[in-house]
Amino acid sequence: LYSREGAVLRSYAGDSRLDHRTHRLLADRLTNALAEIYATLGQEQFEKEGWHVYGGSHNFRPKVGGSSLSTHAWAAAVDMNPSEHVFAQRTTTFSDRAIDIMERWGFLSGGRAWGKDWMHFQAVIPSSSAGTYYAKHGLPKNIIPA
């Protein structure tokens, strides 16, 4: 795990986080993805969509409703704006433009993979549910399935 000091992110409770834990190979990608979203959307839209609200990355636990480990257990996933994106919710405040940026940096959307869990972005190939965005459109061009 890599401890990234100086990250300007807030938890959903609003407390300041000067440090967050994510996999050492993902820390710079996450920082760059959020910086590009900020530069593209501007501060007002960035905050309106909730990209400044950090819900965490590393959490050693099984998948929700399963027994295998969650991608959070490997610090290979991050949750953004969990206060507005509860697990089973099928809508999002995130724009397609911002999600596309996360994908360019290698973070696939839980919402696009499963039609829910819009807070979740992971740096590993998800299994897609039938009828969802990835099932219809395939994975982004820069993502190569294992």
Image: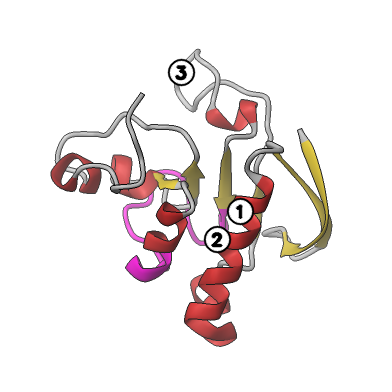
Q: Main secondary structure of the magenta part?
A: loop
Q: Return the residue at label 3.
A: 66
Could you tell me residue 115's position as x and y percent? 28, 46
Sequence-wise, the earlier of marks 3 and 1 is 1
Question: Which quadrant, please, contains the C terminus?
Answer: top left
- Write the residue at 43% across / 62% down: 101
Q: Please tell me whether residue 21 is drawn above or below residue 29 in the rendered image.
A: above
Q: Return the residue at label 1.
A: 30
Residue 86 in magenta stretch: yes
Q: Amino acid at mark 3?
A: Gly
The 10 Å Cα crowd at callout 2, few under 14, some 14 to 19, many 20 or more, is: many
Could you tell me residue 84's position as x and y percent? 51, 62
Tell me, yes or no, whether the two marked residues, 1 and 2, touch with CB atoms within 8 Å: yes
- Foreground pick, 20 / 40: 40
- Foreground pick, 66 / 29: 29
Q: Which residues are magenta?
A: 80-98
